[in-house]
Image (cartoon, rainbow, N blue to C red):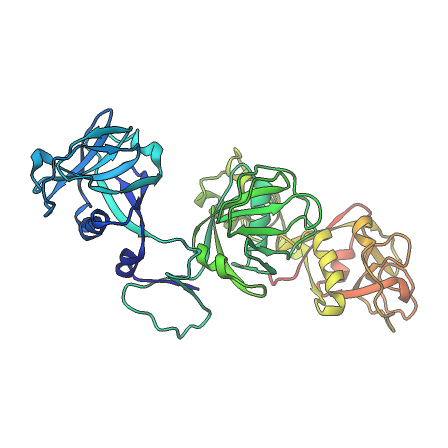
Amino acid sequence: MSIHLSTEKLVKESDDFEIRLSSGKSIVLHLEPGEDSDLWKKHMGDMTGLYVRWVNRQIAAVGAFPTDIEVNRDRRRYRKYDVFFALGGFDNNTTYIMIAREEHRGSYGAGSGIIGRVTLGRHVIDQMKEGDTIESVTPLMSETSRDNVVVTSDMSYKLEKGYSVDTYITVDLDKESPISAEHLLVLSRTGYIDVTESTGSFMASSVDLDAEIPQENYIVRSPGVVTVRNTGPGTGRMYIYRERRQMLSPHNHVGTVTNGLSIAMFANAGDRIGVVTNPQRILAVGMTQKEGAALLQSKGLKQKRTGDLSDEAVIVNQTPEVTLDAMHADEVETFGVPKDQIYKVSLDRGEKNSLNAYYFDKVTGLSHKPIGSMKVHFTFKGMPMVTFEGDEIRGKSLYPNDPFKKCSRGDIGVTNQARPHGGLLGIRLDNSKEYGPTGEEPYGTNIFGSFIGDLDKMLKGLKDGDTVYITEMDL
């Protein structure tokens, strides 16, 4: 979590203030050191509710409120975007805040009165109109500065009055990068992402480097920008930037951190940080048709049921499955099957079998949704195994495990790289000391799980090309 200093302390230390208008837009004022900027800090609490009194070619005037500024009729030069004090009728009881819309010279009764300059939201100045009001004035401080942020995992950390706490980061997703956004949604589906790299320029998560990411939108990588690499070494690596870097086409823009940036700024390799996305993921797979309808309706989306249409049927496929695509679809198709046609499996995810389980997740879809599928490659009545299609390219990376001593009915295995057809998946249908789930000898087989559903029911009427739905969760 990150702990921010109190507003009172920030006012003393900050040189940047966000001024939010009733139009919903805001500008950022950067103060210039001096008596006038100190006076601004003293009176910033008086700014809320003030009106834009008039706007002309040279200035926009906001006010009025009383001060103790001494009258000074000297004529001064003002640069475009300067912010300064002015005395209406040369009377400090009607003090105004002026924003220079162009460079000019003038006498406004407050000497130079220079408070600072508008550094962000300059286009908003041209949109200001009489009657707009100031809704809030908030001190800002760079989230890359430790002067106003403490990042800690110590839940006993003592808080003082006025401190604020962020326990997660919020990411607004880029609608022009739907696949990249979905990659983040998958990585953060547990509510967290794991930090695997940390440098001065970024933090990164390399949890899934086996993703297919097309080139999508890319922008300048400013602090808080989230990207994913779409090609080359590290494809699938997620980055959150701490320093400004130029735009690069291999880095798709996933979204931007809008809350809790300080957590990402100071996260170290090995940390786990909470992530909330806007919008959140829309995935009905694993729900009943009735539950899926409620989810989609809550997002303003229309459901089209296919397969088993009953309320109790379990959704095994959703089209579109990508959240940002689903949000813009006329309707979302949910394909249901009876609950008893989804079979439970148990996978060994220990160090010895982590690569095998990872391969299985990728091939079946369990890597990104709670219900996966296997397409039957070959089955025949009386066969001691049933085999399922795999991924021959990914299968080349499956190193041999220690040869098994015995293969039991229900064991799930894969042909490793030591044999042709590496990546082929299988389930053993009887006990054997000689052959594994794909019919290979022990040295060519990696066993990494077991089918614990009703195997006889699954096999009944099964034929080549059929799809078997599997899950690790209890339905």
> x, y percentage for residue 192?
53, 59
Closer to us: 356 or 146 = 146
Closer to us: 163 or 439 = 163
Q: Quadrant of the N terminus?
A: bottom left
> x, y percentage for residue 325?
55, 38
Q: Is residue 402 above or below residue 89?
A: below
Is residue 298 visible in the rendered image? The answer is yes
User: Which corner quadrant of the image does residue 113 belong to?
Assistant: top left
Instruction: Check the image and name the residue furthest to the front.
Output: 74
Q: Is residue 400 above or below residue 48?
A: below
User: Which corner quadrant of the image does residue 322 belong to?
Assistant: top right
Residue in the image at 60% along x and 56% along y:
205
User: Which corner quadrant of the image does residue 326 belong to?
Assistant: top right
Is residue 321 visible in the rendered image? The answer is no
Q: How many marks?
A: 0
Q: Quadrant of the C terminus?
A: bottom right
> x, y percentage for residue 343?
69, 59
> x, y percentage for residue 20?
28, 42
Closer to us: 355 or 225 = 225
Going by the image, does 465 lie left or right of 349?
Answer: right
Residue in the image at 49% along x and 57% along y:
265
Residue in the image at 23% along x and 48% along y:
37
